[in-house]
Amino acid sequence: MKVKLLLTGKTNSDYLKAGIDDYAKRLKHYLPFEMVIISELKNNRKMSEVQQKKKEGELIMAQINSPDFVVLLDENGSGFASVEFSEFIRKKMISGLKSMVFVIGGPYGFSDEMYKRSDFNISLSKMTFSHQMVRLIFVEQFYRAMTILKGEPYHHK
């Protein structure tokens, strides 16, 4: 199964970039993994939140293929413990799914069209994190899930 992580805008902090790059590199040991950065909107100060979400949604949708299983990282999504998340991934892998796309949207979340297109929504926490921080948290948790599935000692119960 191929996994793609779609990100809206560049990661600004060097320490976050370093962590994200480290875990992304580690993930490639387990499966094909790529991150795609969608450019930030230009002149977005002149746009309403709804307009921004709609335009970001259009840019995101252009990176998604029809057979992709799309997961939005959304504050109202389903919550998982790390072992539960690894089980979710395992089930998708054995189902024959060819491509899974995780999406981290911009600061205002997702458009209605994105919610309609998504197959599943995941919340990483009941707390709110910046969309910059979520990137590192997600790739670490995905790496953790892969080590759990392989029985490797990274995760401690």
Image (cartoon, rainbow, N blue to C red):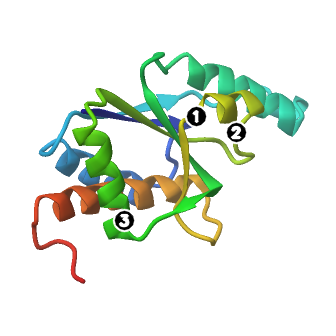
Place of residue 4 in the rendered image (x, y in percent of width and height, measured from the top left) = 37, 33
Could you tell me if the residues under marks 3 and 2 are in contact, i.e. CB atoms within 8 Å?
no
**Alpha carbon separation for disc pair 3 and 2:** 25 Å
Q: Is residue 26 above or below residue 148?
A: above
Residue kind at label 3, given as amino acid type: Glu
Of circles 2 and 1, the one toward us is 1
Q: Residue at x 25, y 53 (%)?
A: 22
Give the secondary structure at mark 2.
loop
Place of residue 91 in the rendered image (x, y in percent of width and height, measured from the top left) = 30, 47
Place of residue 12 in the rendered image (x, y in percent of width and height, measured from the top left) = 52, 49
Give the secondary structure at mark 1.
loop
**Alpha carbon separation for disc pair 3 and 1:** 20 Å
Examine the image and state in which quarter residue 99 appears. top left
| Outermost residue, front side | 95
Residue in front for this viewpoint, 1 or 102: 1
Question: Within 10 angstroms of label 3, few (less than 14), some, or many (20 or more) residues?
Answer: few
Q: Tell me the number on the disc at residue 84.
A: 3
Q: Is residue 101 above or below residue 85?
A: above
Q: Which of the marked residues, 3 or 2, is nearer the chain's N terminus?
A: 3
Q: Which residue is mark 1?
A: 118
Q: Residue at x 30, y 58 (%)?
A: 87
Question: Within 10 angstroms of label 2, few (less than 14), some, or many (20 or more) residues?
Answer: many
